[in-house]
Amino acid sequence: MLAAVGIWIVLDGGASSTALAQSPEALPSPSFDTGEREYFDPTYPSWATILAHCATPDGFSYELLIANHMGALERQLFELSLVTRADFEAFSRDKQLAFLINTHNIHAVRRVAGRYPVKGIENTRLFGSALRSRDIFVLDRRWSLAGLRGKILGDEFRDIRALFAINWAMRGCAPLAHAPYTEATLEDLLERQTRAFVRHERYHRLDARRPYFDASPLLKRYRDPIERDYATLWGFIEHFADAETAAAFQRRPPKFRWGKFVKKLNDWRAEQD
């Protein structure tokens, strides 16, 4: 892992516990006037600023976002709202998927930031499910986080790696990537995110003595689309795991032991306490 202050980049190696304790950095975000430029920038510069300063492999710093980067969040939300359905349909397939992933993650963060501190995203709504609240207006219609997730993971895009790109503000999800998804970076980031998730000891661990593979329940819940894309669940693990785990799966696939999905907030500070 190569880490810079406030920015984390996952390379092909596995994540170590000591390298994961990178602290977000408190730097100011630029303020903006919505009249400055009323167009959508597909590189998501404001979201890039937020991720660079607030996202780590251990979670997201909502406290830092609220203290220093709400201007950037407002700017990015404004730009997302400018994209019409006609604009979206003219995008390439990768540009569409990048837009949906970023939109989901930005609005999950927005929802928590508006009511922080909370124990989890479901605590941001008094009645009903926060994930099913249709309070996101993009592409000329209203969406919920669950609706966006369904669109991202549906048959239109057919890429289960996108599951590890979206985070609905829960610790059981894969951590947010270090940078926005764009048309140019989508393939590389999807591959890196999936590999990082499979190799992260918080979610997956090989017990070669038994042999067992402790696994995230996300793999069980989404087993069908995983096997659609990688033939078998074992093949998926072998593709993204470290060398030791891949070798164990080649010799004789270990039995899966499914963990419990953690719904508490993906708050970086909570992980340090």
Image (cartoon, rainbow, N blue to C red):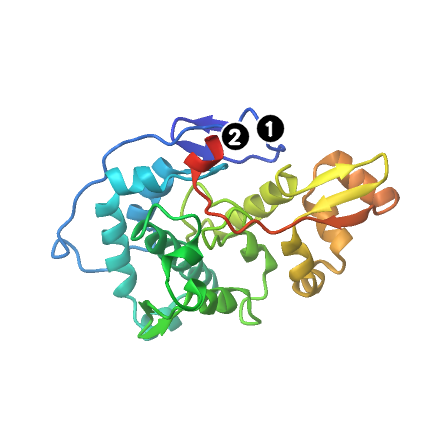
From the viewer's side, name the closer residue of 132 and 24: 132
Tally of numbered tags: 2
The residue under the point 17% across, 44% down is: 31
Question: Looking at the rendered structure, which numbered label has been put on residue 20?
Answer: 2
From the viewer's side, name the closer residue of 184 and 194: 194
Identity of the residue furthest to the top in this view: 18
Q: Residue 65 vs residue 185: left or right? A: left
What crowding class fits label 2: few (fewer than 14 Cα within 10 Å), some (14-19), or many (20 or more)?
some
* Quarter assignment of residue 206: top right
Q: Is residue 104 visible?
A: yes
For badge 1, the amino acid type reads Ser
Identity of the residue furthest to the right in this view: 251
Coordinates of residue 77 in the picture (x, y in percent)? 28, 57
Coordinates of residue 15 in the picture (x, y in percent)? 59, 32
Residue 226 against residue 53 in the figure, above or below: below
Secondary structure under the numbered disc 1 in the rendered image: loop
Q: Are marks 2 and 1 in contact (CB under 8 Å)?
A: yes
Quadrant of the rendering where the N terminus is positioned? top right
Coordinates of residue 181 in the picture (x, y in percent)? 43, 51
Q: CA distance from mark 2 to mark 1?
A: 7 Å
* Quarter assignment of residue 230: bottom right
Coordinates of residue 165 in the picture (x, y in percent)? 51, 52
For badge 2, the amino acid type reads Leu
Quickly name the residue at label 1: 16
